[in-house]
Amino acid sequence: MVYDPPEDYPPKRPEDSEQPPPPAPETGEGDPSSDFAWSADSEPAPDYPYWPPSESEQPPEGSEQTPPPTHDTDEIASLSGFVWSTDSAPMPDYPYWPLPESAPPAAKKGRSIVSHAGRLVRDLVETVILALLIFLAVRAMVQNFRVDGDSMEISLHDEQYILVNKAVYFKVDLGFLDFLPFYEAGDDATHYIFRAPRRGDIVVFRFPAQQERDFIKRIIAEPGETVEVRDNLVFINGKPIIEDYIKDKPMYNFGPEVVPKGNYFVLGDNRNNSYDSHTWGMLEEKYIIGRAWVSYWPFDNFGLISDPHLEPLGSGGETP
C-alpha cells in the first residue's frame, strides 16, 4: 500500500480550510430523524467529513445491511488536505496512516533465542573471569608441592604432598611514607606483614645454583647468628640445640660461621643424607617461596605441619 502525503501535512481542520464546514442544524436538537445532534456548544467537528446517513438512506427493515458508502477522493482531499494516490488501495472512510506491522511470531522467537544465548555467554564469561581471579589470588598465597626424596625424614616423606603458605613471609616497603613528618622508615624500609622466617620453620625455596629446582629444608640459624656443627651436634652462638625430630645425628663438621644479613642456614632432618647449607652454603632470603603448612596426601599424614621451637640450651636459663 503506497501513500503520497501532501506537502501541507498534517491535514487542516474544516474551519481552517478554504471550504466551509458542513452546515450545522439551526437548533441544538438536530434532525429528529437522526440520532446525531450538533450544537454550538459541542466539541469541534472531526477531521474527517462523516455524517450519519439520513432517513432516506436508511435500509428498509429486513434488508441486508450494506457498508456505508465511501466518499469521493476529491472531496476528501479538498476538506482534509490529503492526496490519495490512484495506485493505492481503496480509500477508507477517514484519512489515517497505517500502523507498522508487528513482527511475525517466528521472528520474535528467533530474537528471544538470540537474546537468551547472549545472556548465557555473558554469564559464562563473567564466571570464568571470576574463577580465574580467585585462582590467581589463592595461588599468590598458597601453593602445593610434592616432597621428592628422603632428606626430610622423619618429618616428611618421599612423595608426600603439602601446601606451602607463601603469605606468611610477605613484605612491604614503607619507604613511600617518608614524606610524613611523624614517620621515619630508617635504613631498612622493608617490613614483614606477618613475621620473618625463623629457626625451626620448614621452608620451600628455589635452589640458588639451579633456580628451576625447588628444595625443602629446615631453618637452623638466623641472620647474625654463629652456627657450627661438631661432635654430632649443632651449635648456635656456641650453645647446642636439642633436636628430637632428626633421623640421625650429623656425622660431619661445619663452621663456625656467621650467617650474613638476609641469609639463613638450612639443614635437612635426615642430616647424613641431605644436600643443604653445610654443603653449598647459606640460603639468601629472596629464594624462599614459603613455609610448609599442611600435609594433605597421603591421607594418613593429613594435618598441620608442626615447627618445633628451637632454642639453644642455656638461652632460657638452662645449662648445656
Image: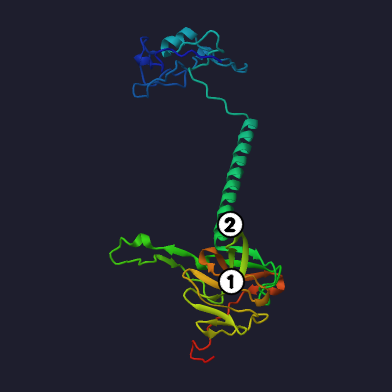
What is the quadrant of the C terminus in the image? bottom right
Residue type at mark 1: give it: Ser
158 sits left or right of 122 in the view? right
Q: Give percent across and percent down for residue 178.
A: 33, 62
- Helix, strand or loop for disc 2: helix
Q: Is 216 located above or below residue 227 in the figure?
A: above
| Tag of residue 135 | 2
* Residues packed near mark 1 inside 10 Å, few (<14), some (14 to 19) or many (20 plus): some
Q: Give percent across and percent down for residue 282.
A: 54, 70
Which residue is more in the foreground, 126 or 267?
267
Q: Give percent across and percent down for residue 39.
A: 36, 21
- Helix, strand or loop for disc 1: helix
53 sits left or right of 152 in the view? left
| Tag of residue 277 | 1
189 sits left or right of 95 in the view? left
Q: Is 259 located above or below residue 41 in the figure?
A: below
Residue type at mark 2: give it: Phe
19 sits left or right of 52 in the view? left
| Tag of residue 296 | none
- Residue that lies at the very extreme toward the left in this rendered image: 181
Which residue is more in the foreground, 39 or 302?
302
- Mark 1 and mark 2: span between their CA atoms? 34 Å
Q: Is 91 located above or below residue 140 in the figure?
A: above
Q: Are marks 1 and 2 in contact (CB under 8 Å)?
A: no
Q: Nearer the viewer, mark 1 or mark 2?
A: 1
Which residue is more in the foreground, 180 or 247?
247
